[in-house]
Amino acid sequence: MTWTPDSWRTFDALQQPVYSDQSAVEEVTKKLADRPPLVFAGEARSLTEDLARVSRGEAFLLQAGDCAESFDSSADSIRDRLKVILQMAIVLTYSAGVPVVKVGRIAGQFAKPRSSDVETKDGTELPSFRGHIVNDIGFSESERAADPGRLMEAYHSSAATLNLLRAFTKGGYADLNQVQAWNQQHAAASPVGQRYAALAEEIQRALRFMQACGVSTVDEESLHQVDFYTSHEALVLPYEQALTRQDSISGDWYDCSAHMLWCGERTRQLDGAHIEFLRGINNPLGCKVGPTATVDDVLAICDTLNPDRIPGRLTLISRVGADAVTETLPPLLSAVADAEHPVVWVTDPMHGNTYTAEGGKKTRHFDAILREIDGFFEAHRQAGTVAGGIHLELTGEDVTECLGGNVNSDDELARRYETMCDPRLNASQSLDLAFEVSELIRQRGER
Ligand code: PEP
Ligand code: CO
């Protein structure tokens, strides 16, 4: 079947907002289709090349950010999310000795799939919150109504966030000489903050040593800038279609809402609209792989999303849970390897380990997260394949949403529980994790 940006419309599209005024949606998406692209085809192609290196074990992917991004993100909160990702990347690069490909769940991560269409509170039933691109988190009829104007707001909010990220990553803030300044004030005094400070000092000493030896570190661009890519779940298809453009150089189609788009666990049906849409765009793609995915499912996803077996094109993000990972994953890894599909395998240790704590807060335990990552590396050891990266939900702030590390009791969860959707790692939990993962990557290299 031939693909067009709107060919998904003849397939079943799950998890779509229900708008009361369809003509308003058409009006907004028509305007969006005229707006400038947010990212560019050449950038998406660079990410594919970087991910190809990950698929060969020459680099490691760190994909991280909010579960559900807010239209109200302050400049400080965006900067702090970038900071913690840069910190983690430097820990992984320095301790494990591999280049890290940095991809944010940011500048467009506004749409959430939900397990129920409705939420009931005190006897009142309203539509579920589906992310700021659809409706608002407040519990009233007007806030929960799907508003087409939010599609345009998502575009503008993405543009503003991306603008700030581009300034930070290319304009001096991400300079290696700033490595000490990325330490978050609230985390700097903690043991892991101090461990980071010591590592930053070592890096600075190494830079001074190179200069003293006469190696010019001034002109070396890679020391002063970083490549930072954006990604989100491609969920609300009219929005993604409106941002899809034909590249003037190659004639290929790209969804210019983000560098990388992924398909969620709830919308990865092979005969569904999301897979249909994604197969035709040339951005690097992700697809979540949950505990029910069979070998046949995974091979069919590979054949559909990457029929030409282009390295870096497809990242499979497994999220099977800490208990299942060493049993569930190895057969999938072997089958994909035997079929000679050059995928990037990444672990999302968050979504298979969510539970409700005493007191009713949705949480995840740091130890379970670590256990799934450990099991992921172990599964790859068994299958002889490459453990390519991690996919995390985190924030740079001092929130208390996940247990473990510096959050020790169910009671403490209430202190700063701010997520609009799933519980995120805070800055020191994230840093802690980076040190643990760098050890696992080091072992991967020693095999
Ligand atoms: C997510 O990544 O926030 C998400 C909803 O994940 P999944 O599709 O794996 O459940
Ligand atoms: Co989530």
Image (spheres, rainbow, N blue to C red):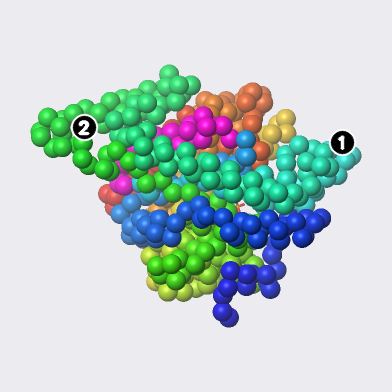
| Residue type for callout 1 | Asp
Along the viewing direction, whichever of 405 and 224 lies nearer the viewer: 224
Above/below status of 225 relative to 27: above
Along the viewing direction, whichever of 64 and 248 lies nearer the viewer: 248
Image side of residue 168 versus residue 329, left or right: left
* x and y, in percent, of residue 246 in the image: 49, 67
Query: Which residue is tagged 1?
Result: 122
| Quarter residue 93 falls in | top left
Q: Is residue 92 magenta?
A: yes
The residue stretch that appears in magenta: 73-99
Q: Is residue 352 magenta?
A: no
Image side of residue 442 versus residue 419, left or right: left
Among numbered discs 2 and 1, the one appearing first in the sequence = 1
Q: Secondary structure at mark 2?
A: helix
The N terminus lies in quadrant: bottom right
* x and y, in percent, of residue 148 in the image: 72, 52
* x and y, in percent, of residue 399 in the image: 57, 28
Q: Is mark 1 within 8 Å of ligand 2?
A: no
Is residue 147 among the parts visible in the rendering? Answer: yes
Residue at image x 53%, y 69%? 279
Q: Main secondary structure of the magenta part?
A: helix
Along the viewing direction, whichever of 389 and 228 lies nearer the viewer: 228
What crowding class fits label 1: few (fewer than 14 Cα within 10 Å), some (14-19), or many (20 or more)?
few
Above/below status of 290 relative to 272: above
Query: Which residue is tagged 2?
Result: 207
* x and y, in percent, of residue 95 in the image: 30, 38
What is the count of numbered marks? Answer: 2
**Residue extending furthest toward the top:** 189
